Amino acid sequence: MIIELGHFSLVLALVVALVQSIVPMVGAARGSAALMGVAKPAALLQLVLVLTAFFTLMYAFVTSDFSVVAVYQNSHTTKPLIYKISGVWGNHEGSLVMWVSILAIYGASVAAFGGNLPPTLKARALAVQGMISVGFIAFILFTSNPFLRIFPVPENGMGLNPQLQDPGLAIHPPMLYLGYVGFSMAFSFAVAALIEGRVDAAWARWVRPWTLAAWLFLTFGIGLGSWWAYYTLGWGGYWFWDPVENASFIPWLTGTALLHSAIVVEKREALKSWTILLAIITFSLSMLGTFIVRSGVITSVHAFAADPTRGVFILTLLAIAIGGSLTLYAIRAPRLQVGGLFAPISREGGLLINNLLLATGAATVLLGTLYPLVFEVLTDNKISVGAPYFNGVFIPLMVPLVLLLGFGPRLAWKRGDLAGALARVKVAAGGAVAMVALSLLINGAASVADVGGAIGLGTAMWLGLATLSEWADRVKLTKSGAFARIGNLPRAAHGMTLAHFGMALLIAGVSGSCAWKQERIQTMSAGQSVEIGGFTITFEGVKMVQGPNYEAGQATMLVAKNGKTVTTMHPELRMYSDPPQQLSYTNVHTTFGADLHAVLGEAQGATESFTTRFYYEPMTPFLWYGVLLMALGGLVSLTDRRHRVGAPQRAAISTGAALPAAAE
Amino acid sequence: MKRLALLAATLFLSTAALAVEPQEMLKDPALEARARDVSKGIRCVQCQNETIDESHAEIARDMRILVRERITAGDSNQQILDYMVSRYGDYVLLKPRFMASTLILWFGPLLVFVIGGFVVASRLQLRGQAVAPLTPEEEQALASLAEASLSDSGDKAS
Amino acid sequence: MAETPATAPAPKRWPYVIPLVAILALGGVFVKRLLDIETGAVDPKLLPTVLISTPIPDFDLQALPGRGQALSRNDLNGEVSLINVWGSWCVACAYEHPVLMEIAATGEVPIHGIAWRDEPAKSLGWLAKNGDPYTRVGQDPASKAAIALGVVAAPETFLVDKQGVIRYKQNGVITRADWEHKIRPLIAQLKK
């Protein structure tokens, strides 16, 4: 009965979404406050209905109601509670319900907190949100219904792949979706602005917090997925450039560009049509990322192939959403008013180059991801585009971006002083050179990896010092009263410093792990030792242990440094029962600046010797600190007073209009 | 969603047998390093998006062993890659070769950057010219604007 | 990226259409791909065969113990033949096997087997149980011949002409329809 309640809620939500997508739009066109007023209760009601459906499904998973197909196929009574819950979004149908739930949360937030928005813009933006809801709820109900029942009811479920039974991975999809779907706000506001024919500083100020929120979730989500791979796959790999990862990375790149170009619109009313385009493209890429990748079009996994209607439905949906918004863009964007002027050397100029590099980066990853598909369709032949391509083409693009990142924030708006800015980054430049020299001295310059690693560390040092010194200069850290100035500095400025510094740490982590990672693969019997990264690891043997839903061979390995025991590691080789699968559990020992991974392989014949693998990952922890700092920077920026109190009235903020018209 | 699809595809494989096994490895560390290097550029023909170096599939293991035999026999890295291409086509190379049909792949990013850069440069030039002849009143307006601006970070216009 | 400068007489419209055109082109590719997959015109799992019209690569495989009739490259000269890559561990091979038995029964073409990545005892047991359609059988325990032939997954079958040139390759199971409509006519043609 409860299951049917969820199903019924979702049907009602579709009806409400239909109303939400039509009535306020008509109201805005006719100037009817009453019709526009429908948007708010509709968005709130939709949230209630969609969440009812979502929690109903969760209830079915938690109570292991195997009469529901989705539960039967993805759950099992022996699964720990947290994985029963995460099982809701661990499958196609449930993840779609979560997708529309998050969409409804964002929509309801605008309805509830967007009190100071101009009524027509708010009504139109919510109507666009309603349209997206209609499309995806219809997709769920007509092709991917999670509330379908089976009879007779199976005894137990088919279980969840044990490798996916991991706390990091359990919250990875929600974070990713909060990011992907969050960009729908920028999209809806962009479409609404195109309909209104007006983009100004106020618009940018309303859009920015939503974009920032989406960006920080996406950053955290991607980081979480990467971290999961790093500590579970067993050999320290964290980024593989596979289509699924790229699908989340491309909108991250364009979203990052959007975040920065929206600043230019907000402060200077320039780059308007470009910002609108970025908003449309970022959400379009998010939808492509969530759906096309899983449709079997790109990878050969037949997620949708079992049901051809799904593929056709989703392509039609995307064609309407993306094609429709870009058509509107083609018609309306040329008429957008041109905003503030600026000199090439200026903050705007710097942000423009930032956008050019980020957009080129996104285009590169998109090209590499789609090229095999387009190639096959056009030539009937197959090629692969893998990590060597992306590393070779993408990374060189990011080097100028990072160099620019060092002094761009020091350029003034409108017209910057390049010589002055460069003079203030001397310390950072010196630090970078010293870092390269130090690295070459310590690690040598014997191989390409050594030189590349040194350059990477130098780049990280450049960005780190430049970012910190810019912050220090701004709050005049060495002069009295610095504390007060730190307090007075807008949160957004602190956020920027944190995010950029996080980027520096990330670069350091990637450089270190790429250049100086070590590995030892061997067969060991009890009592034997291996040296790696300054550690001595002694293998003590393997014993059987019992886990909640698995049995495992657990190794004991003594880790010593300079003759002193540092820790004991216990990697396991697990045998799960539902579904039956063997899985290696990697044990990671982390110090502040390096990680040590220990992996237990299979026994060699009947002997007491086992295959063991050890990986020493120098500096990789910095990568994770960096991701956390970037997300934290976004969060701090989001708490900026100006975002909290909302945007001032349109007239008050449109300072760009006061610019001397003669200059145009 | 990372690797979810991939994991679904390898659901029925034993994930414990991790890639390179000790008995496969060459005694000479330099040759073994070369073998690892070559293996990282060859795609496993049975898997989702994995190199033979990281794959658990048996054919990947056989290909790894073949790579090592060829290295021991004195083949160059390029000869080994060429051999694999002659058997499985360009699909096995994770780094696509330069050829007519991959020109867009290799030079597309540069093209995007150059065209984008050209557009940016022409806009900036236009703006630069337009901004240059400011009247004193405009200068004043700009200065006061900069002060009154809500800008949090760029108040260096003074 | 295009802000229209106010000094320009009329805004250029065409640059704003570029994103739409690009996405439509991409959409077209997606649609074609999806249709290809759904109509079965393309199997995304298959790799294109590169060895068609090239001489079959050199290999020399040992016979299954007790069965005799080893298989090497030189055994293929002078007559049209089929080479079937199979394994006792391969589920699809068992499904294909009756068709191979029927082909062997026609006597129109010799079928040689490559026992891929298998133990000799298991291969022999499998042939004893399911019937032995093969003229010659060679063991390929370490994929030497399989990789040389560009084999991805069993079963795969090569049609080789009198000069030892590969003329056709069947990826996956040979069905009766494949035999009647594709392979049999080709053999008749090659025999001329």
Image (cartoon, rainbow, N blue to C red):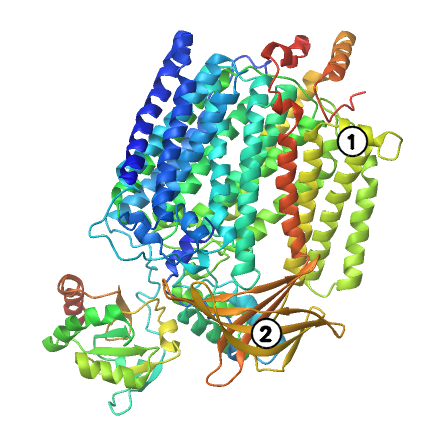
Q: Residue at x 25, y 88 (%)?
A: C69
Query: In terms of depth relative to the viewer, which is nearer, C146 or A8?
Result: A8
- The answer to whether A45 appears left or right of C95 in the picture is right
Q: Using a 10 Å C-alpha cutoff, classify the residue at mark 1 as few (fewer than 14 neighbours), some (14 to 19) or many (20 or more).
A: some
Q: Position of residue A267 (x, y in %)?
A: 65, 21
Query: In terms of depth relative to the viewer, which is nearer, A87 or B73?
Result: A87
Chain letter for mark 1, please.
Answer: A
Q: Report the disc number at residue A556.
A: 2
Q: Using a 10 Å C-alpha cutoff, classify the residue at mark 2 as few (fewer than 14 neighbours), some (14 to 19) or many (20 or more).
A: some
Q: Position of residue A394 (x, y in %)?
A: 58, 47
Looking at the image, residue A46 lies above or below residue C97 = above
Q: Give the residue type at disc 1.
A: Ile
Nearer the camera: disc 1 or disc 2: 2
Q: Residue at x 32, y 59 (%)?
A: C46
Query: In terms of depth relative to the viewer, which is nearer, C46 or A378?
Result: C46
Residue matched to label 1: A486
Q: Report the disc number at residue A295.
A: none
Chain letter for mark 2, please.
Answer: A
Residue at the limit of the structure toward the bottom, as seen here: C66
| Quarter of the C terminus of chain C within the rendering | bottom left
| Quarter of the N terminus of chain C within the rendering | top right
